[in-house]
């Protein structure tokens, strides 16, 4: 029982580092990422990123050098610290085109300027010239070029960003048009959706907090009342699903009745109400279909649902002894956010490392990446995927190590003070190479899938039906392969924690165990995943239900579609992050049980490590499948051993 505390594997062998070559490869790759970061910061003209530059290559807030062939370059912009766009809404982010002229100004316009006379008055009073440098302030109202080289009227009030010195309009309508341009959809539908989101942002934020609280409460429920969790969860899902469906139909009838009582001529507000009625009808029909399918599934799985109570009881004990498991999504999310922010900063610096080139169509100066920098960008993109997968794999390995330590320690009072921290140290000391190799395998599958997805989106509407079908089939196959490899990797990490073997050996051993116990795996995963799915549905349904009621009491909001979709998506992601940890714990427990039941038979000196509830759960599964009880728990017909002899239990 003390093998883990003494730095040994289950078999009593001293722990050793696994997959050292892959740790060396990953370390060298990280050095490459660090080199790109240092190079981009050193040569990337970070001042252009922070301070910004105008359309003639002048960095705002600095005295600039002349750019050959650009007449208005090389200006002293020491006093002009802010970037001002003449038409801030005319920017195409997806195609990386800024059609609006950018200037360096000393002050952003803090009031609305409706005429060129107002622009001239603002320039004279504040010394901030808002027209192109080649137009004198005195000619703002008379110069023929003012229509193209002066700001588009009316000029909205703006203020500079906290760090990046860009004049940003304070009116969100401009952001609506900007988003419309970015999505290349010149219509009013997107404008209406975004306006609805901006109008209901307080409700959206409140509902997102509610989803987070519900997910945490569900984790507490799993820990302390696992014996009744399944039935409570099932009843709540039935009530919420049926109640939510009934409320949607009631709201649809209520809104339709209110609209029918009004005049035949539809005002703009009534047109919005008509759209809400159509959205409510779609929601009601979808909720009805979903509820019927859900009730049918629960009816056919009602017998197996009872067996899940025992499995959840054991997993609940794990969370009782390892409460820090519930915080793993926070640490992983924080690590991913820190990495993504640093990655994005380096990417932006790389974008500023190009050379100034004058656009032949617009005559504006752009900075373009060429030569070796292009390969650095691709290297940096691969690093985003590999290191992100590495961070996620570290979480999986940490959870596996902690649960394995808990399972194979008979006297729970002898557990480490903080098993999660002990598992983190063990991963950092022995198994980083295994984590690097497993995450690289996922990266090898994810990169071609993303490339094919990008090609499919770029060729949308251009390729023939056969090519479109083949692309979708390849993307689907790669997605399925990625999911299978992710599940196998998780079990390989568990096998590594048990036997202290390298990744390939652990993956083979875990695969053999899973294949030999395919029926049990299917039963546990099907019922367990279904119950966890019900938990996610409960969080999403309750959040959406509260959202519908909140928006119903605020009918002046423009639309409901996008706010509800945003809230439901966030609620699903939050619930998935929390309950995925519970799902990993269940998978690790089963693999530990498979190894335990093979190498121990309950006789003196070979006592089981497993919890009685887990053994009863598997035995009940076997009885439902119509199998006969074996003579001994360690019968060769019941469970095959892991194929690695050197690292198994004595």
Image (cartoon, helix red, strand yellow):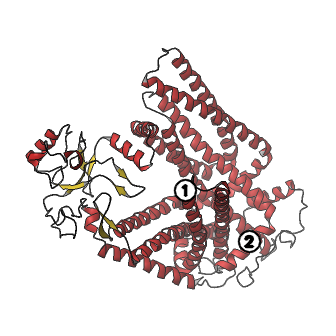
- Tell me, yes or no, if residue 471 can be seen here: yes
| Closer to viewer: mark 1 or mark 2 | 1
Q: Quadrant of the N terminus?
A: bottom right
Could you tell me residue 321's position as x and y percent?
Answer: 59, 61
Residue 457 is labelled as: 1
Q: Residues within 10 Å of mark 2 (few under 14, many from 20)?
A: some
Task: Identify the residue at image location x=52%, y=42%.
Answer: 565
Q: Quadrant of the C terminus?
A: bottom right
Q: Is residue 468 left or right of residue 81?
A: right
Task: Identify the residue at image location x=53%, y=80%.
Answer: 429
The residue that disc 2 covers is 511
The one of 331 and 183 positioned closer to us in this rendering: 183
Q: Are marks 1 and 2 in contact (CB under 8 Å)?
A: no
Q: Is residue 493 above or below residue 171?
A: below
Residue 64 is labelled as: none
Could you tell me residue 372's position as x and y percent?
Answer: 40, 78
Could you tell me residue 521's position as x and y percent?
Answer: 76, 61
The one of 21 and 480 positioned closer to us in this rendering: 480
Which tag, 1 or 2, sits closer to the chain's start?
Answer: 1
Q: Quadrant of residue 489?
A: bottom right
Q: CA distance from mark 1 to mark 2?
A: 36 Å
In terms of secondary structure, where does tag 1 sit?
helix
Task: Identify the residue at image location x=72%, y=85%.
Answer: 646
The one of 219 and 99 positioned closer to us in this rendering: 99
Q: Is residue 277 above or below residue 291?
A: above
Task: Identify the residue at image location x=46%, y=77%.
Answer: 30
Q: Quadrant of residue 629?
A: bottom right
In terms of secondary structure, where does tag 2 sit?
helix
């Amino acid at each position: 029982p003390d093998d883990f505390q003494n730095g040994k594997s289950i078999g009593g062998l001293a722990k050793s580092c696994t997959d050292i070559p892959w740790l060396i490869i990953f370390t060298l790759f990280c050095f490459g990422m660090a080199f790109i970061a240092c190079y981009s910061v050193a040569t990337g003209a970070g001042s252009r990123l922070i301070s910004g530059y105008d359309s003639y290559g002048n960095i705002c807030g600095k005295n600039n050098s002349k750019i050959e062939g650009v007449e208005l370059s090389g200006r002293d912009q020491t006093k002009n610290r802010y970037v001002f766009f003449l038409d801030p809404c005319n920017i195409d982010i997806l195609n990386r085109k800024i059609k609006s002229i950018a200037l360096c100004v000393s002050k952003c316009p803090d009031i609305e300027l409706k005429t060129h006379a107002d622009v001239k008055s603002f320039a004279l009073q504040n010394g901030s010239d808002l027209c192109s440098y080649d137009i004198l302030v005195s000619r703002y109202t008379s110069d023929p070029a003012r229509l193209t080289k002066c700001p588009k009227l009316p000029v909205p009030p703006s203020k500079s960003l906290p760090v990046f010195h860009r004049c940003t309009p304070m009116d969100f309508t401009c952001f609506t048009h900007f988003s419309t341009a970015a999505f290349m959809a010149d219509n009013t539908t997107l404008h209406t959706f975004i306006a609805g989101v901006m109008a209901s942002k307080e409700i959206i934020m409140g509902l997102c907090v509610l989803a987070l609280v519900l997910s945490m409460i569900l984790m507490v429920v799993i820990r302390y009342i696992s014996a009744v969790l399944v039935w409570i969860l099932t009843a709540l899902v039935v009530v919420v699903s049926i109640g939510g469906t009934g409320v949607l139909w009631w709201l649809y009838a209520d809104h339709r009745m209110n609209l029918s009582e009004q005049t035949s001529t539809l005002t703009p507000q009534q047109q919005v109400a008509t759209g809400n009625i159509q959205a409510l009808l779609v929601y009601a029909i979808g909720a009805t279909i979903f509820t019927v399918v859900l009730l049918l599934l629960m009816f056919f799985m009602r017998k197996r649902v009872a067996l899940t109570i025992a499995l959840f009881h054991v997993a609940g004990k794990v969370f009782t002894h390892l409460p820090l498991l519930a915080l793993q999504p926070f640490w992983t999310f924080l690590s991913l956010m820190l990495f993504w922010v640093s990655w994005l900063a380096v990417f932006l610096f790389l974008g500023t490392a190009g050379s100034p080139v004058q656009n032949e169509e617009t005559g504006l100066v752009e900075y373009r990446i060429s030569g070796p920098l292009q390969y650095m960008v691709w290297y940096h993109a691969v690093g985003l995927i590999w290191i992100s997968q590495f961070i996620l794999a570290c979480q999986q390995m940490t959870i596996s190590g902690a649960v394995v330590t808990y399972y194979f320690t008979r006297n729970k009072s002898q557990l480490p003070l903080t098993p999660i921290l002990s598992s983190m140290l063990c991963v950092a000391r022995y198994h980083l190479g295994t984590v690097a190799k497993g995450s690289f395998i996922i990266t090898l599958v994810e990169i071609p899938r993303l490339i094919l997805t990008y090609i499919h989106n770029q060729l949308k509407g251009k390729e023939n039906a056969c090519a479109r079908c083949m692309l979708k089939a390849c993307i689907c196959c790669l997605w399925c392969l990625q999911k299978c490899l992710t599940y196998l990797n998780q079990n390989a990490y568990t096998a590594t924690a048990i036997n202290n073997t390298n990744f390939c050996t652990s993956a083979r051993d875990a695969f053999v165990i899973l294949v030999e116990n395919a029926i049990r795996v299917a039963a546990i995963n099907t019922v367990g995943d279904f119950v966890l799915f019900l938990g996610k549905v409960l969080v999403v349904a309750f959040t959406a239900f509260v959202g519908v009621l909140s928006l119903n009491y605020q009918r002046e909001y423009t639309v409901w579609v996008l706010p509800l979709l945003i809230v439901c998506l966030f609620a699903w992601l939050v619930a998935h992050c929390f309950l995925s940890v519970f799902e990993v714990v269940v998978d690790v427990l089963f693999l530990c049980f498979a190894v335990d039941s093979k190498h121990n038979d309950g006789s003196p000196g070979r006592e089981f490590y497993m919890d009685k509830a887990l053994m009863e759960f598997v035995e009940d599964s076997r009885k439902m499948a119509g199998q006969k009880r074996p003579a001994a728990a360690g019968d060769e017909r019941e469970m095959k051993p892991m194929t690695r002899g050197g690292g198994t239990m004595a």
